[in-house]
Amino acid sequence: MDITAAITRAKGEPFEVTTLQLDDLRPTEVRVKIVATGVCHTDAIIRDQVYPTPLPAVLGHEGAGVVEEVGSAVRSVKPGDKVVLGYNSCGVCPQCLTGRSSYCAEMFERNFGGTRPDGSTALRDGDTAVSSHFFGQSSFATHVNAAERSVVKVDDDAPLELLGPLGCGLMTGAGAIMNSMAVRAGESVAIFGTGAVGSAAAMAAAAIGATTIVAIDLVDSRLEAARDFGATHTINSGSEDLGARVQEITGGEGFRVALDTTGITAVTRQAADSVGINGRVGLVGAPAPGDEVTFEVGSSLMKGWSFRTIIEGDAVPQQFIPTLVHLWRQGKFPIEKLTQTYPLDQINQAFEDSKSGRTIKPIITF
């Protein structure tokens, strides 16, 4: 069938809205009519080929829509269901079978490879194959043939135009706090970077009762917004003495938890330096391949701190996305405060506004 999609044809080029051909469903796929899809930093770094997905490609991995058709082997959803789309996984490797599907043995191939596992692509531009199934979906399109493991059913009254970002960025930030770092009520949390992932982390930290939530960024407008998302303190690390402010806010003890959402290795080092004895540091950003970060060993040994990398907030989409919807209904995860919608033909403006900080989480509507 013919669909409308935003395609990126070459490294660094703007997205082009065009008509493509979508092939027939496979047995384990779900055809979804996309209502809205979030714009994520990961889409930008693939467009710019920081990470290699074959081009031309239809990206997009925070889709939300309505099921139109299901493959013969699909049992989890039916036509008419409202769904949010998350990342893809194999379902049979040891990581998937133990509830850690974000570390699936086939994570890269199924989310960045540009094809189905059998090497076929669902999209064509005339005679030219177009990379599909980005995160099992490729949701910068009016319709997708999504992998069933990427599909999460939500309530019939769910606002699809708002919930797509739960599939990646917001799930990652909230999951990093609630799952990966296991933040407890009363703990202090520092969040480095206040884009969509950092904002979701602040919301989650507030929802579970962290008492000191510090947002750290270079953009004053984002820091001001962070207070609406739960931050109790803010630090502009470009104009303030970060170390002095950390000591002031924590009474010299350092943070219990620090989360780097920027993927900038110098910031990762700052996050590590900001925690106190037995502190916990998490990294959810996406550094360029080959980037390294160093830690001073002597004082680190005395602190007994821990460091871990985090993929997708250690979340299983089918379990965690409904949890976030429930928190949203309770007013504890106010997604609407950080989103702005754009029509598909303004997708490049959405990316520019995200980069500049004008919009924290752009959502493309169809």
Image (spheres, helix red, strand yellow):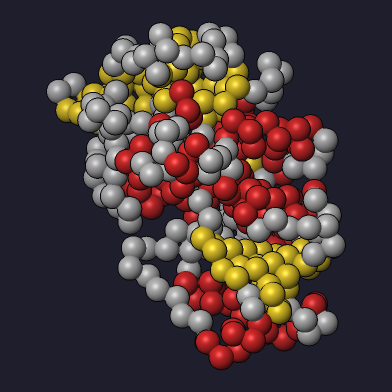
Residue lying farthest left?
A: 127
Q: Is residue 229 left or right of residue 338?
A: right
Q: Is residue 329 above or below residue 213?
A: above
Counting from the top left corner in percent of width and height, residue 351 is at 46, 47
In the rendered view of the protein, which quadrant contains the N terminus?
Answer: top left
Identified at 45% across, 41% down, the residue is 94
Question: Residue 190, can we see it?
Answer: no
Q: Is residue 346 above or below residue 74?
A: below
Tell me the quarter of the picture where residue 217 sits. Answer: bottom right
Question: Residue 295, can we see it?
Answer: yes
Q: Nearer the viewer, residue 149 or 202?
A: 149
Q: Nearer the viewer, residue 284 or 74?
A: 74
Q: Nearer the viewer, residue 35 or 117?
A: 117
Q: Is residue 348 left or right of residue 298?
A: left
Counting from the top left corner in percent of width and height, residue 348 is at 42, 42
Counting from the top left corner in percent of width and height, residue 307 is at 56, 68
Identified at 52% across, 30% down, the residue is 85
Q: Is residue 92 left or right of residue 176?
A: left
Identified at 84% across, 62% down, the residue is 186
Identified at 48% across, 17% down, the residue is 33
Tell me the quarter of the picture where residue 218 sits. Answer: bottom right
Q: Is residue 72 above or below residue 207?
A: above
Q: Count the marks.
A: 0
Counting from the top left corner in percent of width and height, residue 268 is at 53, 72
